[in-house]
Amino acid sequence: MSWWSDFLANPVIQQKLPTATLETLQMVAVSSLLTALLGLPLGLLLHATAAGGLAPSRIVNSIVGAVVNFGRSLPFLILMIAVIPFTRWVVGTSLGWQAAVVPLTLGAVPFFARLVETSLREVSPGKVEAARVMGSTRIKIARAVLIREALPSVVAGLTVTVIALIGYSAMAGVIGGGGLGALAISYGYQRFDTQVMVACVVVIVVVVQLVQVIGDALARRLDHR
Amino acid sequence: MTEPQIQLRALRKIYPAKGADVVALDGIDLDVPRGAIHGIVGRSGAGKSTLIRCLTLLERPTSGTVTIDGQELSGLPEAKLRSARRRIGMVFQHVNLLDSRTIAGNVAYPLEIAGVPRAQRASRVAELLELVGLADRADAYPAELSGGQMQRVGIARALATEPAVLLCDEPTSALDSATTRQILGLIRDLRDRLGITVLIITHEMAVVREICDSVTLLGHGKVVEHGALGDVVGKYGSHLARELIPVPDLPLGVERSLVEVAYSTDDVATHVVLAAVAALGTDAEIAAGTIETLAGRRVGRLQIDLPDDRVEEALSRLHSAGVHAEVTR
Ligand SMILES: Nc1ncnc2c1ncn2[C@@H]1O[C@H](COP(=O)(O)OP(=O)(O)O)[C@@H](O)[C@H]1O
Ligand SMILES: [Mg+2]
């Protein structure tokens, strides 16, 4: 078991792994929360303004659609570098996990918004029509019918998005975002410390598994079909 | 004579399209009296769905008026329309229950929209579920119910805000025949108890026969035939009468014809008709026939298979016996 005791005795793993893990978790948690808060209304807007939606508008739909597609087509690495001035303006610095939240959120919102739109499209138009005949307003229909009925599927989409964010968060480490990505680069890549590399991979795999299990359980609880 | 609960005047709906516009409704006039069950039938594309969508103003009519329970809906702005719609209950073919809510939650939903306080909501929901015989399933989810039970919930939900009229769009088309009969029985029972006015859209003549007091046949956006059920079945040659009391299609030998005979026992007794047929002799045969009682009226329809050269004589004998007779093939 000498490999194992070596592994645990590795000063980088002892001192830096916990901090890096915490940074990654904070980075992912905050950007996931912001993505959910911004992506849900954006997805709703995409769905509502489409033909046959609650408030069809071809102009709004094509403008929002184009912006979303633009955001989705940018590779994350490029987006991250391109928004550095914006990040500085918002956070005050372009370094640290707080700064990484900005590009992570900007990258994930369009992705999640499309997933939300797809989920909302699966809600049968008959349910919306029934609510309209009952005299409901469109805003109430959006909340009580569209979003509530699509919730299990939206939660599944959010799970996919959070897992994608975990992947991107490692990339954010490359340009000073900190977290497990930064640790893996500076020790695993630049100093060939395999133990650190393995530790980073294990932590990330565990976190991804946990997110998936929790997401699946939540979606199942919400789904009564 | 009270004013009709549902009144349509010169209702037109035109869908603009590239090339020729689609005239989905072409000047519909319709009156449904309070407490009546009225059926709307017609082929696919006749305009039935458009008619019901215009009735709820989900679709704005191009011209004409929709008046329900004395209130003209067609002129109302959106906000007023929302509260006016509470006077309309609607039942859908696919029920359209919310999967995320329990049965009780689904029935409570229109009450929430109407702003009914929570305590009142709970007692009203219990009352409604009792009314449709599902009091014991209040906490179940729609996915746990059978098709017939789901439609009962749909009916309870439609009645929640005590509407004056119940609009049903193909309410039994997704159900088997035994369940169809139960649901139709429930609708009739509710009409009898609550005095609600019912409009049913259907493509099934069995539905019309089972519960309708009156019926309208739509074709190409126009009213083709209209009337009380008893009167309509008495218009022997009409499309609706044929569909309501059908006789089977028959194979026919060479140089032979089919004469269709229709009568009501209000006018001619069956034995008189049979005697007139018997008088045609042995080469005229009753090949198919049906005698039924519909809307309190006993109606018979017979197909007589006879040689071509006897047709003239048969028609004159039958006409003088006072029955409707025509060559159908
Ligand atoms: N939203 C629409 N846009 C254009 N045409 C429509 C629309 N809805 C219905 N129509 C047309 O109106 C006619 C009547 O349709 P519909 O009311 O659905 O008939 P039914 O319910 O009797 O089958 C059809 O020719 C149909 O193609
Ligand atoms: Mg239809």
Image (tube, helix red, strand yellow):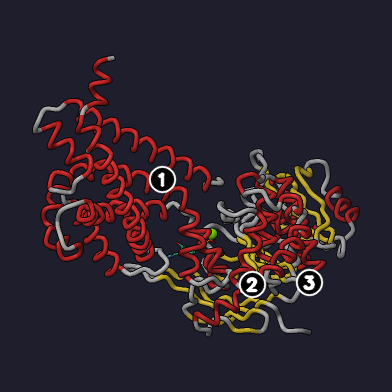
Q: CA distance from mark 3 to mark 2?
A: 14 Å
Q: Are marks 1 and 2 on the same chain?
A: no
Query: Circle 2 — which element?
Result: strand
Residue A146 location, x and y as percent? 47, 59
* Residue at left offset 59%, top offset 81%: B9
Residue B1 location, x and y as percent? 78, 84
- Can see residue A50? no
Q: Is residue B138 left or right of residue A207?
A: right
The residue beneath circle 1 is A156
Viewport quadrant of the N terminus of chain A: top left
Q: How many marks?
A: 3
- Residue type at mark 1 is Ala
Q: Nearer the viewer, mark 3 or mark 1?
A: 1
Q: Nearer the viewer, residue B185 or A154?
A: A154
The residue beneath circle 2 is B88
Q: Nearer the viewer, residue B231 or B304?
A: B231
